[in-house]
Amino acid sequence: MNVSLVEEKISKRTKAIVPVHFTGYMTNMPELIKIAEKNNLPIIEDACQSILGSINNINAGNWGITGAFSLHPLKNINVWSDGGIIVTNDKKIDTELRLLRNHGLINRDSVEILGYNSRLDTIQAIVGNWILPKAKSISEERILNANFLDSKLSKIKAIKIPPRPKNYRLVYHLYIVFAEQRDELLNYCIDQGIEAKIHYPIPMYLQKGVSFLNHKKGDYPVTDKHCNEIITFPCDQHLDKEQLEYICKTVKNFYESEI
Ligand SMILES: Cc1ncc(COP(=O)(O)O)c(C=O)c1O
């Protein structure tokens, strides 16, 4: 989220601000908090990709009235199917969320509000309880891997590393850099056995599902530019040094063979 553009979008209909801490790189929360307070709006953080990410040592999910974390199998910590966590310090929201997840039942027989069947099933809860204490070491390993990739890839002129602000803790749900000849590089890496990807090739504003918003191509030029230049490389905690070296060597080989 480009926080400098938020205030002009606020209207009478705005009920909350929902920053998405995309890739493990948090939205500029110190600035966003100022805007939210000035306009008397709550912040709901989508921290699904940023568990244990922080700014000024304050974790993702601790800035807004609530923070949401996904436990989908592709996330930094995960269960074996679907699950998630909402954190809040607000007693009223806490009570309402607990009701909502279980049909609004306040006890066995009484429906206090209309709710959902959103309970985490027991098997997933066992997996979640097992992995939760590992969240810290998992993010530390991802950070080490990303730092290694940064140090090597930054030496390649055709690769641009995004900013790494010192007061941010980036937890690298996705390790993304900008690359010249991106599509050719992507295909080359895939051919060489690297699971490189684009997150995401079709920007949200051009998805069919939101066509009712009447956006047209070019409405979001920064998004479009990123879409054409970004490439994601693996950097998860299961990779070893040799595999990380292989990614860097492969990218280097691609540009050297292009000259
Ligand atoms: C930024 C973001 N928000 C929300 C979600 C949705 O999470 P879930 O699939 O666990 O509901 C995801 C996961 O794909 C995500 O990456």
Image (cartoon, grey):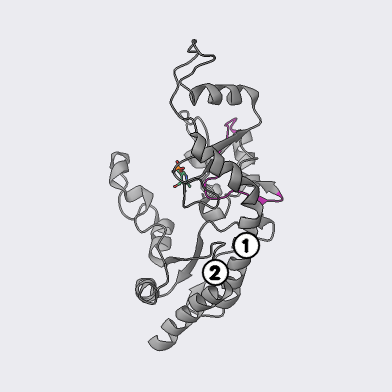
Nearer the viewer's eye, disc 1 or disc 2? 1
- What percent of the width, then of the height, locates residue 126? 55, 40
Q: Nearer the viewer, residue 176 or 213?
A: 176
Q: Amino acid at mark 2?
A: Ile
Which residue: 37% across, 53% down? Answer: 203
Q: Nearer the viewer, residue 38 or 88?
A: 88
Residue 51 shown in magenta: yes
- What percent of the width, then of the height, locates residue 86? 56, 35
User: Is residue 253 visible to us here?
Assistant: yes
- What percent of the width, then of the height, locates residue 19? 53, 43
Q: Is residue 43 above or below residue 160?
A: above
Residue 238: assigned label: none
Q: Which residues are magenta?
A: 39-57
Q: Nearer the viewer, residue 251 or 31?
A: 251
Secondary structure under tag 2 reads: loop
Q: Is residue 109 above or below residue 199?
A: above
Judging by the rendered image, the residue that carries numbered circle 2 is 161
Q: Nearer the viewer, residue 155 or 128?
A: 128
Judging by the rendered image, the residue that carries numbered circle 1 is 141
The crowd level at tag 2 (other Cα within 10 Å; few <14, some 14-19, many 20+) is: some
Residue 41 shown in magenta: yes
Which residue: 35% across, 75% down? Answer: 191
Quadrant housing the C terminus = bottom left
Q: Amino acid at mark 1?
A: Glu
Secondary structure under tag 1 reads: helix
- What percent of the width, then of the height, locates residue 53? 62, 51
